[in-house]
Image (cartoon, grey):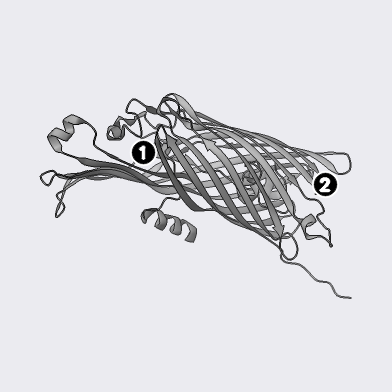
Amino acid sequence: MLLGGAAAYADGDGTFSGYTPYSVYGVGMLSSEGSAFNASMGGVGIATRNKRFMNFLNPASVTARDTLSFMADFSVSGRFSYYRQGDIKSVHNTFNINDFALSFPVYRSSAMMIGIAPFSNVGYDFTTATTDPLRLALQGASTETAKGSGGLYQVFAGAGVTFWKRLSIGAEYIFYFGKISRKVSIDYDALNMLDQESGYTIQARAHGAKFGLQYEQPIGKRSSLILGATYRMQARLRGHLTDYSFASDGTSTDTLRFNQNRIHKDAKIFLGDEIGVGASYRYGDMLVFEFDYARSNWKSSGFSNTSSSVYNAFSNIIDEDNVFSSGVAHSFRFGAEYTPGRNDIRYYYKRCTYRAGAYYTTSYYRFNDRPVNSWGITFGATLPIFKAYNGLTLGAEVGQSGNLKNGGIRETYFGLNLGFNIFDIWFQKPRYE
């Protein structure tokens, strides 16, 4: 609750928890799920079973733990982006809370987890001056701005159980909530022209669920093969919509339109479902390789085609002939992990865990009838702290999203992740001679 309040305050204060010009559509840019541990391995986690770290990408993995172990995970992330479209260039930096989660055992081979994490981010800020000769002659010079902020968060509570020491099944309840604000304003230089601002704010919520399973097959004495699968259900958005339009002469403001309504129960607006599969190979506590694939269908999300003619004043940034629409998102992720000597008592660097990964994704929205593709490489390490499995995870990624074809925008970014995983054994019963 505290983290959600801090995020809402940041959005209301005009800062962006995430930024991309393509977030003008739908619920914005979907956040990369998982903790800093997952992010440093390319975002894999569907087939991950690791008793040292929390993995909430698959609710079935919560059972991978030591008996009586309690775990917590907290991580933050920053992103430094460089944008280009034709001759236009810009940079933007963002910082956001990534996740906060707790995990604890329930009974024998079962366990639970609860947490909060971002689901999507809306952040953009376009400004351009009037270039149309007719408008300049009739109305004079003006500056037009389109701005959006906010996003959705997800609070989740899940549980899992293991059967026959190999098959794990998990389920998770998800509550989505958040605020998305979008507005367009026109500021005229002429004193006899009224400045205008119009936009809307959505207070949204939704209920969803996620299911997962994992099967671990031993191979020899130290190796094992893990197969995993997840399914996240489609979730219908509810909430309130505020639609407004103002005109101002600099000293007074006239309300042209102001409506506050609930999102009607017959409005069919959904968050897309997702199905994922993964496979990983583990060699003792030393080596892990994993590959994941996920497919998310947003075709029936209900987000109507959004022509950027709404922003026709920004023809220098978004061409007015471009159209956004919903589609199917795909992601391909690969990750590897290496620990030289988990229990080495002489060399600290051997107890550290080193990771690397790569990913390729396509967006749930289509721009000019084409998805926006992203690719990147990741790397990082977990530095053990004190006893047990406590650690500090450092991760970084370098990637690129979008392209310059047909008026598109290309983003080149560098991301940093910082995570804290806390581990402890509770309810121990000491015995004395």
Residue at mark 1: 265
Q: What residue type is labelled 2?
A: Gly
Task: Determine crowd level at label 2: few under 14, some 14-19, many 20+ residues with C-alpha closer than 10 A.
Answer: few
Q: How many labels does the image show?
A: 2
Which residue is nearer to you in this view: 282 or 106?
A: 282
Q: Which amino acid does label 1 sit on?
A: Lys
Along the horizontal axis of the image, is 132 left or right of 354? left
Task: Determine crowd level at label 1: few under 14, some 14-19, many 20+ residues with C-alpha closer than 10 A.
Answer: few
Q: In which quarter of the image is residue 7?
A: bottom left
- Give how far across and how far down residue 100 sits, in percent: 57, 56
Q: Which marked residue is nearer to the observer: mark 2 or mark 1?
A: 2
Q: In this view, does 207 lie above or below 325?
A: below
At horizontal 44% and vertical 58% (from top left) the residue drawn is 5
Farthest residue to the front: give it: 87
At horizontal 54% and vertical 37% (from top left) the residue drawn is 400
Q: Is residue 73 above or below residue 195?
A: below
Residue 332 visible in rendering: yes
Which residue is nearer to you in this view: 18 or 299?
A: 18
Residue at mark 2: 284
- Give how far across and how far down residue 51 sits, in percent: 73, 52
Q: Earlier in the sequence, mark 2 or mark 1?
A: 1
Does dot 1 land on a helix, a strand or a loop? loop
Q: In which quarter of the image is residue 268?
A: top left
Residue 257 visible in rendering: no
- Give how far across and how far down residue 301 sits, in percent: 44, 32
